[in-house]
Image (cartoon, grey):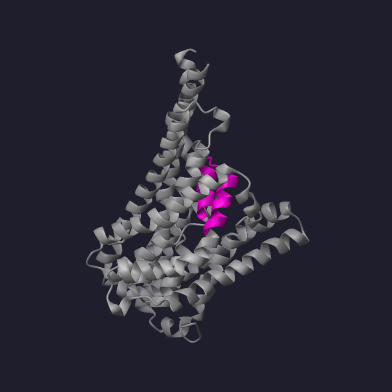
Amino acid sequence: MDQKQVLSPVSMRDDETTPRASQRLVSQLGIFDRLLTPTILVCMVIGVVLGNYVPEVRNAFDTVRFHNVSFPIALGLLVMMYPTLTKVQYETLPSLFTSRTTYTHILISLALNWFLGPFLMLGVAWATLPDLPTYRTGVILVGLARCIAMVMIWNGLAKGHQEYCAILVVFNSVLQVVLYSPLAVLFVNIFGGVEDRIKVEYGNVAISVLIYLGIPLVAGVVTRYAVWFLFSKKFLDTKFLPIFSPLALIGLLYTIIVMFAYQGKNIVHNLGPVFRVFVPMILYFAVMWTSAFILMYRLHLREIKRGTDSENFRFKYDMAVVQAFTAGSNNFELAIAVAIAVYGVESDQALAATIGPLLEVPVLLLLTWVALWARGRFFEGNHAISRQSTS
């Protein structure tokens, strides 16, 4: 085989890293997703201004409370989770038991998301925030919440396997209900090295998860299948969800405004700690995503060395994307909800958790470009070499 032919998959995708390709990638994001980071910044500023110059707004928010949380905050937390859990494809659950490949990727996802991820966030939180236990706790809570929403967007942009991504999202959604509370107690109270005054109680975390994940989960399941039954699957996917999904962003932005209105004066006087929270978040994104992607690449190379037929590859590029983005992103909505419910809306823990969505979009968009760049130079190139060696 001619050398140019072997390298053709690489050269064919060289244009995917050009400025024009970058513009195309951004254009594939919905308008709400494209504007998420600047919109969050604007909402933070609005909240801080309200908190500093309209102090009576806090009393207005506290007029009605729900489970020790002001009703406006509680409403925002529920609203931002509801559409996310409506989009989860629960109907893919039966496919969890259909093939060995599925079991393999579920086990990999389990190890990455529920072992490596929490410990990595714990490590970077301790390394970068050793003198800020309250902010460190908020970062740790983020590390325990596995992503179930935006991962579908990044996976699609990076050309990942959509069906397996949906399966892992369902898998992590179920585990989140079961594991988040005990892991929060373990990582915050024991590994987090916190003082008694900021320890979490299992009952408080469990109730928070039950309220802010359980209620929207039930509502999401009922809504998804009610719309499907009354209309059709096509109507659900093409008409209902595109209109309904932005409600999650509205809920998030509303919650951020209210939170920063509460936190206004605290933020102005503690800008240093707030910006320091950026460091563990960015480190986590980069290290977690890269570790998962390299793991899948190494497994892919092992398949090639064994002479596995390309049609039977279990660790191709599309699965590397699924595992990397599932592991490298987090469910900030749940972390924010638990931090507010357990520590209060004015707490450092809640403020630290809120930094997450501000960074998620630009960092993961950058990693999407990295994935597309690596596609031709590593996975597709090796695929071609494999075909050459077996011909």
Farthest left residue in view: 131
Does residue 142 appear in the picture of this structure?
A: yes
Front-most of residues 99 and 78: 99
Residue 156 lies in the magenta-colored region:
yes
Identify the residue shown where x is 51% and y is 54%.
150
Q: In this view, does 194 lie to the left or right of 169?
A: left
Decide: is 338 above or below 58: above
Q: Which residue lies furthest to the right in this view?
A: 230
Q: Is residue 101 above or below residue 169?
A: above
The reply to whether the magenta stretch includes residue 132 is: no
Assign the magenta stretch its main secondary structure: helix
Viewer-nearest residue: 282 or 310: 310
Residue at 38 percent across and 62 percent down: it is 355
Q: Give the range drawn in magenta.
A: 150-172
Note whether residue 329 is visible.
no
Q: Where is residue 26 in the image (x, y as percent from the top left)?
A: 49, 44
Q: In this view, does 25 lie above or below 4?
A: below
Task: Identify the residue at image location x=68%, y=52%.
Answer: 238
| Tally of numbered tags | 0
Expressed as whole percent of the image width and height from the top left, the position of residue 106 reads 52, 50
- Could you say where residue 328 lies in the image, as x and y percent from the top left? 42, 51
- Which residue in the rendered view is the most extreme toward the top? 2
Identify the residue shown where x is 34% and y is 76%: 52
Q: Left of 221 or right of it: where is 272?
A: left
Residue 363 in the image, given as x and y percentages of width and height: 40, 49
